[in-house]
Structure formats: C-alpha cells, structure tokens
Amino acid sequence: MNSAYPIRRQVIDLPTALCTLGCVGFSDRLREARKRQGLSQKALAERAKTRTMTINSWESGGSKRPDQEILARVAKALDVSVGWLLAGDEAIEGPRADPPALSRFLETLGDDVTEEELDELRRLRFKGDPTVKSYHFMLMAIREAN
C-alpha cells in the first residue's frame, strides 16, 4: 500500500494517555479509595513511600503524569488495582468493602457477629496493617464494652 501519509505505530502509556485527557475521575477515585481506608493524605504517602505533596497533587488534579512505580505502591496501599484507579472500570477491581484481614476473620466467625459489631469493626482504623488477631481482640473488647 503506497500512501502519501505513512502510518506511525505508537506505543501509548496508559497513565499518560488518561492524564492527557485530564485524568478524568482519577483524582476522585484516589480520594474515594483513600477515605474508604480511613487514611489521611500523609498516612497514604507514608504507606506508599512517597511524599504527601504527590498525593495532594494527584487528588487535586495538578499532576499531569503519575509515576507508574509510585502509582503501583499507592494502589497497593489502598487495596485497589492500578487499572481501577486510572480507568474506574467496574470490571476492574475497585475498593473492597472490608480489609482482607477483616474478611478472613469474618469467614471464621460465620454468623456469630451482629450487624452492630460488624459496623464497629468496619469503622476501626489501625496504624499499619491489621491482622486477624487484631480484629479478634477488638471484637472481644467491643463485646465486653456492650
């Protein structure tokens, strides 16, 4: 095929392509996932080993090109996929309702937890990553307090 305009093949970097479009929804999804985990911007930055200014810039839409390595650490810290943060596709894993340790703990309990207790467990915020034992201890404390 002889064309006056040669076809150029270009590799498109997904974060760059999405941010060229103005990071539509990225900052909102980042903020939503951070708040759902009960983290401040500073706490998220510490977990992801980056600067608070980076998180702030992404949430305010000020950053034009998220660094992929930092983005991957942020997604891991928020327990979401990079794809969900960038594209928001519901088919891509989004924020989980419960942290993994709480989910495992609830599996061991079965129906032996009330809705009120479950709500209190979901509202808990831990410094660092909670364990199944952490939730067990907290449930005992909740039951003793009530």
Image (cartoon, grey):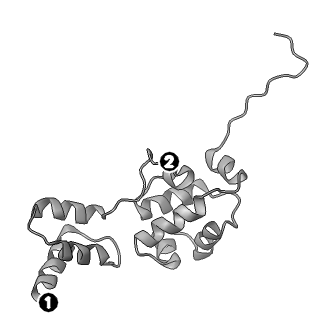
Q: Residues within 10 Å of mark 2 (few under 14, many from 20)?
A: few
Are the two marked residues, 2 and 1, in contact with CB atoms closer than 8 angstroms?
no
* Residue 96 shown left or right of residue 67 in the figure: left
Residue 48 makes an appearance in the image: no
Q: Residues within 10 Å of mark 1 (few under 14, many from 20)?
A: few
- The residue positioned 59% from the left and 59% from the top of the image is 26
- The residue positioned 58% from the left and 73% from the top of the image is 51
* Residue 7 shown left or right of residue 85 in the figure: right
Look at mark 1 in the image and give the residue it sits on: 145
| Observer-nearest of 55 and 87 | 87
- The residue positioned 45% from the left and 72% from the top of the image is 35
> In x, y percent, where is residue 27?
59, 64
Amino acid, disc 1: Ala
> In x, y percent, where is residue 134?
21, 75
Position of 21 relative to 144 (above/below): above
Residue 82 makes an appearance in the image: yes
Element marked by disc 2: loop
| Observer-nearest of 115 and 5 | 115
Find residue 8 and name its label: none
Look at mark 2 in the image and give the residue it sits on: 89
> In x, y percent, where is residue 122?
28, 72
